[in-house]
Image (cartoon, grey):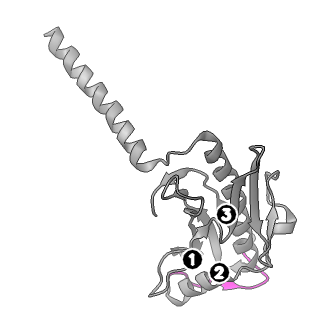
Amino acid sequence: MRNKVTKIIAIVIILIFGGTYMYNKLTKPNLGPKTAKLYQHGFRLLEEQLGTYIKEYYSGVEKIEFSPIYVTEEGSTFSNVYIRPTIYDKHGNKATLGTKVKNVIPSKIGIVSYIIVDFYGDGSESIELMDSNGKFIDVSNKQHLPNEVKLTKQELIDENIELLVEDGQLKDVVKDDKGSPNAEIVYNVNLSKGDY
């Protein structure tokens, strides 16, 4: 009897550990701690940049919530890492930027188009964010968004939000100088494997 109970407990433990291992293998990117930290630092600054822009230049926004940092095609290049902000309007609607609207697929919000991350020769982080003029500015040593990369315009975001409003996914979200000063920004620096 005792032998049977021991076997059952052993099987349950193996299933739990095996299930956890497979879940992590399928959902968590296989990155070294240094690379994971680089992505989290860089994309946290990018989230602050985009969230602040939407909050300051769009009225009718209740909340801006960021997806995890999606990592695809691990080990190939740095070009397959991106995020997706979701905008909630004051009518209870929500829409995610970077998703297909009608027949238009907006660009992904990630490496190369919005941010460049790498390591310098000495192993320290290199993080550059694009400013309003399309120039990349080094923000490697910053923990919060510096003024020089605060956006006053971002055409790709503007076009994407305009598509979402035209499609009826968002209501009364308008670009203006009033903005949405009370909008909540929910940051997310969790790393996730695969496409959204």
Which percent across, then down, holds residue 148? 86, 67
Q: CA distance from mark 1 to mark 3?
A: 24 Å
Residue under label 2, please give it: 156
* Residue at the left extreme of this rendering: 1
Quadrant assignment, res 128: bottom right
Residue under label 1, please give it: 107
Q: Residue at x 78, y 81 (%)?
A: 178
Around disc 3, counting alpha carbons within 10 Å, would you say few (fewer than 14), some (14 to 19), or many (20 or more)? some
Horizontal arrangement in the rendering, residue 169 relative to residue 141 (left or right): left
Q: Magenta part mainly helix, strand or loop? A: loop
Q: Answer yes or no: do the residues labelled 2 and 1 have beta carbons within 8 Å?
A: yes
Q: Is residue 64 above or below residue 132?
A: above
Q: Which label belongs to residue 184?
A: 3
Q: Along the line of sight, which residue is nearer the eye, 78 or 92?
A: 78
What amino acid is found at the position of numbered circle 2 in the picture?
Leu
What amino acid is found at the position of numbered circle 1 in the picture?
Ser
Which percent across, then down, holds residue 141? 82, 51
> What element does badge 2 sit on?
helix
Residue 196 painted magenta: no
Q: CA distance from mark 2 to mark 1?
A: 8 Å
What amino acid is found at the position of numbered circle 3 in the picture?
Glu
What are the residue bounds of the magenta stretch?
169-180
* Residue at the top extreme of this rendering: 2
Q: Is residue 185 above or below residue 177?
A: above
Q: Along the line of sight, which residue is nearer the eye, 135 or 180?
A: 135
